[in-house]
Image: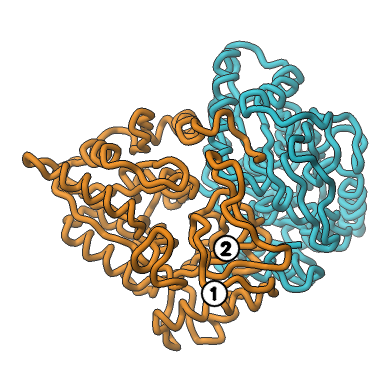
Chain colours: A cyan, B orange
Amino acid sequence: MKKLLNDPADVVVEALAGMAAAHPDRLDVDLEHKLVLRAGGPVQGKVALVSGGGSGHEPMHGGYVGTGMLHAACCGEVFTSPVPDQILAATQAVDGGAGVLHIVKNYTGDIMNFEMAAEMAAEGGGAQVASVVTDDDVAVQDSAYTTGRRGVGVTVLLEKIVGAAAEEGRSLEECLALAQKVNGQGRSMGMALTSCTVPAAGKPTFELGEDEMELGIGIHGEAGRARVPLAPAREIAEDLLGPVVADLGLARGESVIAMVNGMGGTPLLELYLMYNEVHRILAAAGVTVARNLVGNYITSLEMAGCSVTLLRADDELVRLWDAPVDTPGLRWGV
Amino acid sequence: MKKLLNDPADVVVEALAGMAAAHPDRLDVDLEHKLVLRAGGPVQGKVALVSGGGSGHEPMHGGYVGTGMLHAACCGEVFTSPVPDQILAATQAVDGGAGVLHIVKNYTGDIMNFEMAAEMAAEGGGAQVASVVTDDDVAVQDSAYTTGRRGVGVTVLLEKIVGAAAEEGRSLEECLALAQKVNGQGRSMGMALTSCTVPAAGKPTFELGEDEMELGIGIHGEAGRARVPLAPAREIAEDLLGPVVADLGLARGESVIAMVNGMGGTPLLELYLMYNEVHRILAAAGVTVARNLVGNYITSLEMAGCSVTLLRADDELVRLWDAPVDTPGLRWGV
């Protein structure tokens, strides 16, 4: 295993210490609970957004904490759900009296632990919690760690858009409805050229032959739809977009927010090349890209590969997308 | 070779087409000359900044074109210098009458071609051109493609800082002097855990054993100082920072702008972990980090590894650093 680390057991906490050192003006990091929090404590009278999950997907979620996006991220060990105590601590730390929205990717462990934390938080008149579960991955119906579709790229877009809505002062009920709308209008599919290595495991999660790729890969290396021969980028783009566009039922004249996301080990040069293919295919289908992201936003350690996320856009979503955001991972307007 | 591409010969132009599609409001892309230009044509009465070099280091340089940073980037083939015609076209396209500053990394091919383009531009009363050559890499004195030190990470910081100065309306002479100051006050050193594969070559540039790393690696995989056994992150940080701090002659009480840069294939989790080590070492030496960057800023395709750049800071440099910048790769204040 070739990685920049000390003891594999300390990777997450040492990386969080690095985030604290790098962003002292913007973030508070609770190393005991492995939380990334906005500096300055809870925002009174506004809904707070809490997300989290296993580490290894950076910048998600810790890199999305800040004005206009998340209030806290709960960081599990690499590819391991955060525990209820962490999530409870985050929920209590950010509650400003207007309720807390949990943003949970559809993985069985995440769902269970966020639910338990929400119940604990509500006990004795504590924070009011609502939850949205993302399940945008069209690749597989059930998978190794999930019943139903997995939650992947749309989570990033949701955190940005609902973060802007919370900043505007919308109620918990309104933020939840918006979050459900975003999840309902977003779909993703990914692929891998290589595996990645979880530090604690010390060896690749899976093996792929020199001429193979995995279509429909999960963000922890879970099996996807098919292991197929390596193909040109234009074919890969078709393979990823086809199911996404079909499942969304996108029609000529519609517009989307599109993300071409790197899995961690793919150069930006290749991601822009993939975006060129995605843009071309959508243009041919009469679909306009209203906004886009090209880069590493929801990763799987050093896995090579990419995913494509499309979110059916409307004026409200684009306006919230354009609102100022000030996080280590997404930053504009400030 | 496992990459997201079509024909290896078309990688750069297809990636540039992707940049054009992704950033139509911000960038003009000249596919014939492989140039990334600010949208809207030359800025009249202000100095224009042109940089460039081989592709494969994204987001550098194309991703640094925009308000507050570069006016144009000339993109060579992967790890190959841009040719004089490209650089001339860029220089002429951005000249707003106040002169053009060429920002050139110290590689023999780059130097030669930028010099030739500057001469061609000056002929017949064309653009007035000044040039700064970056040579911040303390690892080796001469190397495979360089006489003297290589130009690496400080180039990113220089483009940001001098870009802000040009935006303020400083003269070509003043921009040049500032650029020379930044280069003179910046030092870098990098390391690699793995090689990378140039698409046209189809196989790794070099081989590293399972327990080896290359200290002082160049951004094209050129040999560095030493091939040594893999070490913990804290030792690697000492190995990189030691020569940088010594060469800069940093003293207790000084402050720096620090960049922990990923080579392309290293997860952000590990880069933050490395930043934790860098911050700790500097704190122990009494050196304050005034500003920092942690992420992929000057890469070597999918190489795993990192580099550290320190720039001795002062109030002027920090003020220019904080000025608004609006590029795909660096964005704040707007």
**Foreground residue, B2 or B310?**
B2
Residue A222: give x, y in percent of width and height: 85, 42
Provide the secondary structure element on which disc 2 rests.
strand
| Amino acid type shown at disc 2 | Cys
Three-letter code for the amino acid on which mark 1 is drawn: Leu
Q: Earlier in the sequence, mark 2 or mark 1?
A: 1
Seen in the picture, residue A234 relative to B323 is either above or below; the reply is above
- Residue B240 is tagged as 1
Front in this rendered view, residue A1 or A41: A1
Q: Position of residue A330 (x, y in %)?
A: 57, 48
Give the quarter of the figure containing the N terminus of chain A. bottom right
Q: Kindly identify which chain the residue marked by label 2 belongs to.
A: B
> What kind of element bears circle 1?
helix
Q: How many marks?
A: 2
Which of the chains bears the disc numbered 1? B
> Circle 2 is placed at which residue position?
B306
Residue that sits furthest to the top in the current view: A252
